[in-house]
Amino acid sequence: MREKYFTKIKWRRLFIWLIVYIILFTCMDVFVIENSTEKEIDFYFKMGFHVTVFMWILYSFRKNNLSIKAVIFHPRKEKSSWGKYVFLELLGDLIAVTLLFFIILIIALNSESLIQEIINSDSEVGDSTFFIGSLFVTILVAPIVEELLFRGILFNKWSESLGAKKALFLTSFLFGVFHIGSSPIFIGQLLAGFLFCLVYMRTKSLVLPILLHIGNNCISSLGMLINVGDDTSTLDIALMLSQMKVAAIISGVILLILVPIYSFFMYKLYKTTKMEIPYHVNVKNYN
């Protein structure tokens, strides 16, 4: 009979914590930070959200006598081929970005108003303090909290009840859905979540998945640094259309080349991964 360490963790308590946080934040939004900009409010909300989830995670581990050390670290130091994991993450990011670019191009080619909107777009960084704060939350806070939540708790908990294979696919899907708000196409985050979970199962440690997650968010954050400029309104729409057609063809060819390569390596990684529950392996070694 397999032991079930995570059975007593109740998700309704997390929802209650988040509902209380949203109510408190709404009150602050009305009475304290009402004059803040949209970006500042977004920063406050994301930071508070991740802190609330992190506090719930610590509370759940303490209340249920779970070892956070056994979730994050593997007691035996083993060599890990981190290079192939980095390669797969970068390849997955490239496919996701190319796919998003390809879809935007196809839509834009059939919508002159969207092209004009792209031309006139201007992404400003805004207040440097909140820009740095947003980067801090995105690059450091979010990867740690999300890996503890999705891989550390969700994957271990559902592996006990559903089996590691089903938990792998389910948590990866939810990870992608969770990031829909930050990206219109969640395929990139779904692939990343699948990779992070496989790496967690292979290394029995959250250290490498957290580092890969940080790298993934660093790449995603590059968009925050893009500033189109003020003179883009003078661009020729006809010229831009012809360039978009070429770009759409090129991105389509890139996808046809990269997707089979990525699928081959990910399938190989999946088939050679032992469907074990990391926490069960680690806690026995620590005890």
Image (cartoon, rainbow, N blue to C red):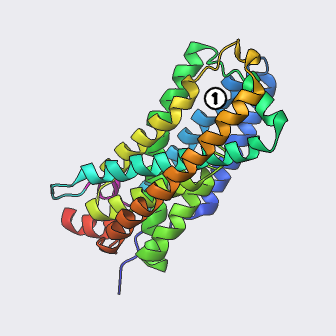
For the stretch drawn in magenta, the main secondary structure is helix
Residue 11 point in image, percent of width and height: 59, 62
Residue 244 point in image, percent of width and height: 66, 37
Measuring 51% from the left and 37% from the top, which residue is drawn there? 220
Which residues fall within the magenta stretch? 66-73
Residue sitting nearer the eye, 145 or 264: 264
Measuring 69% from the left and 35% from the top, which residue is drawn there? 242
Measuring 52% from the left and 32% from the top, which residue is drawn there? 221
The residue at which mark 1 appears reads as 44
Which residue is the extreme one toward the bottom?
1
The answer to whether residue 59 of the structure is visible from this angle is: no
Q: Quadrant of the C terminus?
A: bottom left
Which three-letter amino acid code belongs to the residue tagged 1? Tyr
Q: Is residue 153 above or below residue 52?
A: below
Which residue is the extreme one toward the right?
113
Q: Is residue 147 left or right of residue 105?
A: left
Q: Is residue 198 left or right of residue 18?
A: left
Q: Is residue 7 above or below residue 63?
A: below
Q: Is residue 76 left or right of residue 86?
A: left
